[in-house]
């Protein structure tokens, strides 16, 4: 009985120890727990930072390139911008006025065709003895009237040119202001052409005025020469081949 009871006690103790070990094995981990730490790699961090910086630089370069392209398009648009020239009509009208004055030349006109015929009609090379004195006087008066008309026309052209100077001054100020405010190459070139057009118009005026002045002077000289020639021919006709008076 004692032996059985001792065996029973030992068996019970072994059973309890086994059960306790099983419970401990279930409730406790088989290995002791370790603390969780974040691992920092400086070289990897530096590489990532450098990659990000390069990417940002590429983006900035692309942005700068797009800005440059946009500015280039703006500059091209400015270079292609035109400028108006309302003064052109005024310049053309001024030249037309002077042309109309030049077309008013009487007798000896500013045309090559028929010039010799007109000149010979007013200024014959020989004294026509068949004409009466009244006809010679009428021809002389016609030549004198032609010379006076030429000088009158010259003064009219000069007056018109002087009147145009005030308008040209206003046009010049407008063109200079427009030239200073030009934005692109095309506007600069157009404004330069407009200034050249003004200069050309003024040159045309000078040429017209010189032509009128020289014509008046030429007619005056021709009239004076013709008068001298007619006087000599008239004297010869009056005296004949002999002397007007022969002393005794």
Image: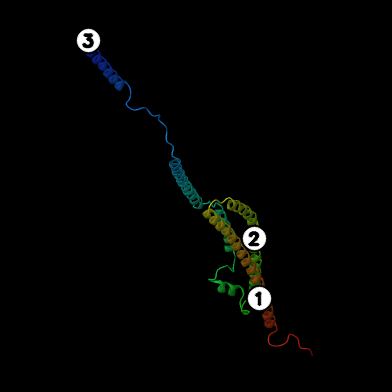
Per the model, the C-alpha gap separating discs 2 and 3 is 167 Å
Image location (x, y in percent) of residue 92: 55, 57
| Front one among 46 and 50 | 46
Mark number displayed over residue 226: 1
Instruction: Name the side, left or right, on which 36 lies relative to 7.
Output: right
| Front one among 214 and 125 | 214
Image location (x, y in percent) of residue 153: 63, 63
Of pointers 3 and 1, the one earlier in the residue sequence: 3
Mark number displayed over residue 2: 3
Of pointers 2 and 1, the one earlier in the residue sequence: 2
Per the model, the C-alpha gap separating discs 3 and 1 is 188 Å
The residue lying at 64 percent from left, 60 percent from top is 156
Mark number displayed over residue 77: none
For discs 2 and 1, the disc positioned in front in the rendered view: 2
Question: Secondary structure beneath disc 1?
Answer: helix
Q: In which quarter of the image is residue 27?
A: top left
């Amino acid at each position: 009985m004692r032996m059985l009871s001792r065996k029973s006690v030992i068996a019970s103790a072994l059973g309890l120890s086994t059960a306790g070990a099983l419970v401990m094995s279930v409730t406790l981990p088989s290995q002791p727990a370790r603390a969780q730490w974040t691992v920092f790699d400086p070289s990897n961090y530096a590489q990532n930072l450098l990659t990000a910086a390069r990417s940002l630089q590429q983006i900035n370069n692309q942005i700068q390139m797009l800005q440059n392209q946009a500015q280039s398009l703006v500059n091209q648009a400015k270079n292609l911008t035109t400028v108006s020239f309302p003064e052109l009509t005024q310049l053309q009208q001024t030249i037309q006025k002077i042309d109309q004055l030049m077309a008013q030349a009487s007798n000896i006109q500013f045309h090559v065709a028929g010039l010799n015929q007109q000149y010979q009609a007013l200024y014959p090379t020989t004294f026509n003895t068949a004409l009466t004195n009244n006809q010679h006087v009428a021809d002389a008066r016609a030549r004198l009237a032609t010379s006076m008309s030429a000088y009158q026309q010259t003064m009219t052209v000069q007056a018109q040119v002087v009147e145009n100077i005030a308008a040209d001054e206003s046009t010049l100020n407008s063109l200079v202001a427009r030239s200073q405010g030009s934005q692109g190459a095309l506007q600069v070139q157009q404004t330069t052409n407009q200034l050249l057009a003004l200069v050309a118009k003024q040159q045309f005026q000078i040429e017209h005025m010189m032509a009128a002045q020289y014509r008046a002077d030429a007619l005056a000289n021709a009239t004076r020469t013709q008068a001298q020639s007619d006087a000599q021919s008239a004297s010869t006709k009056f005296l004949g081949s002999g002397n007007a008076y022969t002393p005794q």
